[in-house]
Image (cartoon, coloured by chain):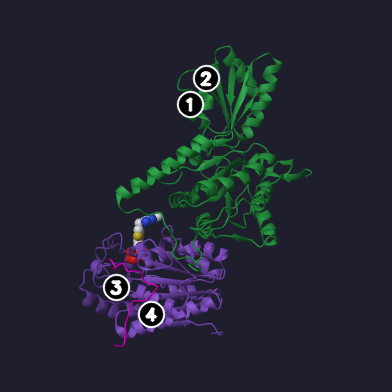
Amino acid sequence: MRKVFSKPASLSDKPFHYCPGCTHGIIHRLIAEVIDELNIKEEVIGIAPIGCAVFMYDYFDFDFLGGAHGRAPAVATGVKRVHPDKMVFTYQGDGDAAAIGTAEIVHAAARSEKITSLFINNAIYGMTGGQMAPTTLLGQESTTSPEGRSKEMAGYPIRLTEMLATLEGTVYAARVSVHDVKHIIQAKKVIKRAFEIQQKKVGFALVEVLSTCPTNWGLTPIEATKWLEQNMIPYYPLGEIKVPKEV
Amino acid sequence: MSKILMKGNEAFGEAAVLAGCKYFFGYPITPQSELPHYMAKRLPEVGGVFLQAESEIAAINMVYGAAGAGARVMTSSSGPGISLKMEGVSYLAGAELPAVLVNVVRGGPGLGNIAPAQSDYFQATKGGGHGDYRLIVLAPSSVQEIVDLTAKAFDLADQYMNPVMLLADGILGQMMEPVELKDIKPNIPAKPWAVNGMKGRAYRNLIVSVHIVAEDNEKFNLTLQAKYDKIFQNEVLYENYKMDDAEFVMVAYGSSARLAKGAVDKAREKGLKVGLIRPITLWPFPSERLAEAATTAKAFLTVEMSLGQMVEDVRLAVNGVKPVYLYTRTGGMVPVVKDIVVELEKIVQGGGK
Ligand SMILES: Cc1ncc(C[n+]2csc(CCOP(=O)(O)OP(=O)(O)O)c2C)c(N)n1
């Protein structure tokens, strides 16, 4: 019998603990597949966030460091400056990267740290109970915007990837989604590219992944994928925003 | 080796380099600026990296990354910047990562000023960051001691897997003295726990400070306590100055101890039997030495450049056995030897504060 499907070697045997319909697990798997395909499992160092993916290191079988909320790009900078030939990636939620850790990700990008930065945008604070995130859409209900986010009170959602793409130091910036199979396949290609850019030491590479949070959005998993497609993609358009000439 | 003239802030840097520190992350603030300036020039010469971070928060987290990656690493700042680093210090302590921080203390609270002070004693020795942890705190009182204790700080950090702070002040940072860069060698132990990619290892390395189950966190904190007990047993450092026949004991560290020594000499000229105990480790604090001195001394006088912070540890150690008096200047003001002697005379006559 021919084996057509197996678990990536970079994933551990631990089952994901994420809520039904949450896409953190899909994104983890894509990262593991990319690391296997690039054959860099023994070179890679992951930096875990604080958020629902705080325990992501349990699901991978390679070196990991977990630090403070929002500071992963600074931690990654410290690691990469000590080991410039290793592969370092960060994985941050929208609260982690676009609120408390804004300064760290902006300056890691400005310095063009040769790391791969994954930014998981689920338009909400998942771990702490569905509070409004900097990426929560106008009108979107959350536990801290119960009547829906109003621009008068809370201003406008941040398009972090477009913002970082304006910096010279950001050499690659792309937004993908994982709400259906077609987009998952596309997302993997983009994530792989962001790791290849690091291998070539070109500069800071960022991939934003639109992600679902059915639990805190108050939707079923299927409704959540539809909500993402109908509401998030129009505000957060998909595609490669910035691509280096060299690759 | 012959002596060379060095500024305190630069001495921190050179001693760190000799001790094998190749990485420095910091954010500008007075009165410690000569240290990053020195490292910006010096580290590239030894194949290291100096990086100016966007904030003290970023700097301490870069330190966390570099320490986790297995390197000897340093950061420095002063009051307001140290406050921002405190979250990171708690994470370093929680993840048991070795790193060295320098605090060249300035007047506070708030923005305060850039004059020398000792008002960050509480922050350094009592927590500052959140959670059950201890920071090893070393207090040099000369440029030579800056050199010696900086090298020691890296060794202690690696030995105990704990952050170490060098607590100085604007006087020590700015003063120039001849120093000998004695036989400082990089005694860097193997770091099989470092995150540097799995190549050549059958296992992966993981560095975190989370213990989500309370029972596990308690168990972990008790291992921290056992480590702290060991530090307390083995690493206390202090200097006795004219203590042999002292009836009145001054307690002072860092710059104040230099002035207190002057006051001991002046008081002795007047026939007063005064001595000085100078804590060199502020945590672990030389409590046992003070308790012992309390059996023979008539009274204690703590001299500090703060409203009185270390005095609480002196009082705990003396435990009510003898009176403990306090003489302080604060907000960046420096005590004068003459005034300390006046205070001593009052105490001898039974009228101290
Ligand atoms: C300094 C600090 N502030 C607040 C928190 C609490 N906290 C933990 S996770 C989180 C938000 C996470 O949201 P996000 O980054 O969007 O990730 P998600 O959980 O949605 O994956 C917050 C506020 C913390 N751990 N540390």
Say which residue label 4 marks.
A176
Say which residue label 1 marks.
B317
Question: Is mark 1 in CB contact (under 8 Å) with mark 2?
Answer: yes
Say which residue label 2 marks.
B294
Task: Tell me whether marks 2 and 3 sit on the same chain.
Answer: no
Q: Residue furthest front?
A: A1
Q: Which chain is purple?
A: A
Label 2: element kind: helix
Question: Is mark 2 in CB contact (under 8 Å) with mark 4?
Answer: no
Q: Chain of mark 2?
A: B
Quadrant of the image containing the N terminus of chain B:
top right
- The residue drawn where x is 64% and y is 23% is B339
Nearer to us: label 2 or label 3:
2
Task: Tell me whether marks 2 and 4 sit on the same chain.
Answer: no
Mark 3 residue type: Thr
User: What span is in magenta?
Assistant: A1-17
Q: Quick check: A63 above or below B224?
A: below
Q: Chain of mark 4?
A: A
* Image x and y of residue B258, in percent: 66, 31
- Seen from the viewer's position, the closer of residues B343 and A12 is A12
Residue A212 image label: 3
- The residue drawn where x is 34% and y is 67% is A151
Task: State which quadrant residue B266 falls in.
Answer: top right
Nearer to us: label 1 or label 4:
1
Mark 4 residue type: Val
Q: Earlier in the sequence, mark 4 or mark 3?
A: 4
- From the Cβ of disc 4, is ligand 1 less than 8 Å away? no
